[in-house]
Amino acid sequence: MKNKLHAHVPYDRLAEHLEYAIANRINPEVFFSADSLDHIVWEELSSLSGAIHAAGLKTTIHAPFLDLNPGALDPSIRAASRHRIQQVMQAAGLLRPLAIVVHPGYDDLRYGGNRLEWLKNSIGFWLEFVPQASEIGTILAVENIFEKEPSTIKALLDAVDAPCFRHCFDVGHWNMFTNVTLDEWFSELGGYIVETHIHDNHGQCDEHLPVGEGAISFRQFFPLLARYAPDAIWTIEAHNTEHLQRALKNIQNYIS
């Protein structure tokens, strides 16, 4: 478990948390906001990447997502989204992440009546980046956000049909937005899962609580993960060090 355990850290705070990550053998999932990408010093990123890999740690990346939508019907929104992902791929060339988590941008409220057009746009968007991801040696992992059930993500994954284009299952988002069971989600998308975001909530808001401190049944979740995606990356999405430490401790109650 330790070898595949990652934890969320914003890029702007990576340097200050690096010593803790190395000492505790926690691989960073580096979140790049739009602002951090616009002001990034590439030599600094290269230096941080060198220190991470010299310590024997791996990385993943979480791409920016606010206001972005790769399947947007407005081409200007797709263009802005493309620009951000291009920046992320440049960062990936230095960080050499195992995976890059991306948001799909779909929800029924906005796109339910235009699902096929959204899906066509999204497929074309991600096919542009598949060759680059393959060349870098990383996997683009589409995270579930507002999806009520897995059919839209599955249609996107099936259509792109590339080993470097897979799924990041966020169990916290599943608990908030999805109307199918964990068993049903895993039966549809379990074979696509390369990463999972692990945090807890009570189903009303994205609390990012430590494992076992909300309403999610992790006694059901971890066996399903072991069955369908035994090699998946585990990313603790804690928003402070105290919650991370509690999450690491609490996880031991659910795994052997």
Image: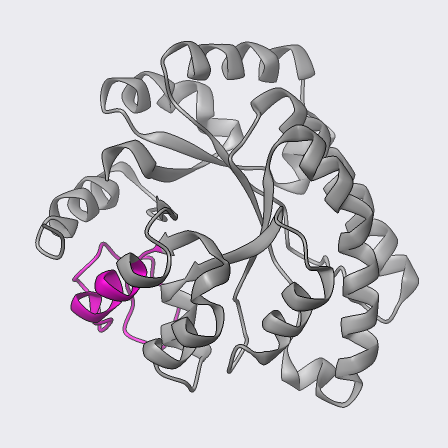
Main SS of the magenta part reads loop
Task: Give residue 46's position: percent from left, percent from top.
Answer: 60, 13
The stretch drawn in magenta includes residue 17: no
Answer with left or right where residue 110 lies relative to residue 250. Answer: right
Task: Give residue 86's position: percent from left, percent from top.
Answer: 77, 38
Residue 62: which quarter of the image? Answer: top right
Task: Give residue 59's position: percent from left, percent from top.
Answer: 47, 30
Asked whether residue 175 appears in the rendered view, the answer is: yes
Residue placed at 45% from the left, 19% from the top?
A: 15
Choose between 9 and 218: the one closer to the eye: 218
Residue placed at 18% from the left, 43% from the top?
A: 248
**Quarter in which the N terminus is drawn:** top left
The stretch drawn in magenta includes residue 211: yes
Kindly give the residue lying farthest to the right in the view shown. Answer: 75
The region drawn magenta spans 198-225
Residue 4: which quarter of the image? Answer: top left
The answer to whether residue 85 is above or below residue 109 is above
Task: Give residue 237's position: percent from left, percent from top.
Answer: 36, 49
Residue placed at 52% from the left, 30% from the top?
A: 11
Residue placed at 90% from the left, 58% from the top?
A: 76
Q: How many marks?
A: 0
Asked whether residue 105 appears in the rendered view, the answer is: no
Answer with left or right where residue 229 lies relative to residue 11. Answer: left
The answer to whether residue 71 is above or below residue 41 is below
The answer to whether residue 238 is above or below residue 7 is below
